Image (cartoon, rainbow, N blue to C red):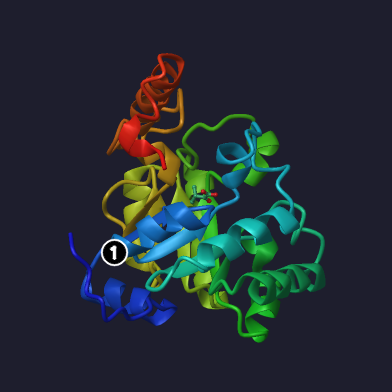
């Protein structure tokens, strides 16, 4: 796919227009300059500097250990690569749960030190005060409901959320509250497709799904999962577009073999 060189930045308004017109929104994660450059040039609408960097980049088991400073480092690298996409930066665990003043300070640091365009926070009613306070500073906020990995120790598992009536009703309530509070979009992670569809119909802002079926306004995946770099992660919702892990291993094995056999460098590969 070739992308028009006259790039126009995707904004939160673009996303709302896309929802209004029924155009699907494509979102992926990125955590570094080189990958973000490729993703941005490929026509993606939104790049999420996700706190999944904690797993994917740093090898932690959960998203909890990543710090605000580390998120800022990743986000600044991504922003330097992006001409077209809207760059959304995850507020990491511990940077906003305390109180709304702390949340605002963290959001301001992200915006000032990364050049990102918006922040994302996990949670419903409990984060509404922070959402409103951050919005007063002119910082766009994306919500995140359903499976919220920062609460993994509360949930106990990474299973599908909101299968029961009470949790589903609570999720709809939270989504409406986040939208009314001014969130420009909401991520719904790993919930039944019928519930996600209902949220997308009843909530006026774009609903971006991951493991939430096709009847929402857009989709997000973790880049390293869809490229087949992540090992041993095969949830039903994940479509792998490449087997990059295997291809990279093959290339590195070939390089090792070429060095060992003195095949590399050859006469043309030297001065
Ligand atoms: O951190 C992340 O990558 C995310 C996506 C899974 C939505 O929050």
Give the quarter of the image for residue 61. top right
Residue shown at 66% from the left, 85% from the top: 136
Query: Where's residue 79, x and y in %?
Result: 52, 67
Residue 207 seen in the figure: yes
Query: Where's residue 80, x and y in %?
Result: 52, 68
* Quadrant position of the N terminus in the picture: bottom left
Residue shown at 81% from the left, 66% from the top: 99
Residue 28 lies, with reference to residue 242, above or below; the image says: below
Query: Which residue matches tag 1?
Result: 43
Is 260 left, or right, of 155 in this rendering?
left
Give the quarter of the image for residue 42. bottom left
- Bin the neighbour count of mark 1 within 10 Å (Cα to Cα): few under 14, some 14-19, many 20 and up: some
Residue 131 lies, with reference to residue 41, above or below; the image says: below
Query: Where's residue 253, x and y in %?
Result: 41, 20
Residue shown at 46% from the left, 65% from the top: 81
Q: Nearer the viewer, residue 179 or 68?
A: 68
Q: Nearer the viewer, residue 142 or 191?
A: 142
* Quadrant position of the C terminus in the picture: top left
- Judging from the image, what secondary structure is the residue with disc 1 in? loop
Q: Nearer the viewer, residue 119 or 73?
A: 73
Q: Nearer the viewer, residue 111 or 143?
A: 111
Residue 29 seen in the figure: no
């Amino acid at each position: 796919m070739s992308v028009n060189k006259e790039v126009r930045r995707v904004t939160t308004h673009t996303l709302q227009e896309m929802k209004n017109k029924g155009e699907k929104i494509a979102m992926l994660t990125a955590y570094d300059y080189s990958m973000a450059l490729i993703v941005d040039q490929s026509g993606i609408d939104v790049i999420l500097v996700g706190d999944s960097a904690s797993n994917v980049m740093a090898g932690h088991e959960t998203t909890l250990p990543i710090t605000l400073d580390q998120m800022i480092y990743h986000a600044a690298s991504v922003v330097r690569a992006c001409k077209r996409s809207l760059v959304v930066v995850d507020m990491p665990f511990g940077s906003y749960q305390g109180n709304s003043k702390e949340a605002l300070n963290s959001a301001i640091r992200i915006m000032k030190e990364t050049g990102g365009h918006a922040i994302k926070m996990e949670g419903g009613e409990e984060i509404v005060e922070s959402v409103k306070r951050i919005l007063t500073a002119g910082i766009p906020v994306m919500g995140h409901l359903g499976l919220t990995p920062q609460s993994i120790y509360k949930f106990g598992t990474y299973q599908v959320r909101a299968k029961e009536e009470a949790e589903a009703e609570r999720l709809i309530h939270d989504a409406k509250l986040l939208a009314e509070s001014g969130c420009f979009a909401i991520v719904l992670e790993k919930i039944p497709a019928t519930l996600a569809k209902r949220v997308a119909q009843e909530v006026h802002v774009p609903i971006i799904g991951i493991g939430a079926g096709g009847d929402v306004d857009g989709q997000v995946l973790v880049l390293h999962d869809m490229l087949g770099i992540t090992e041993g992660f095969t949830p039903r919702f994940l479509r792998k577009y490449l087997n990059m892990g295997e291809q990279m291993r093959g290339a590195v094995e070939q390089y090792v073999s070429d060095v060992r056999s003195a095949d590399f460098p050859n006469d043309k590969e030297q001065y």
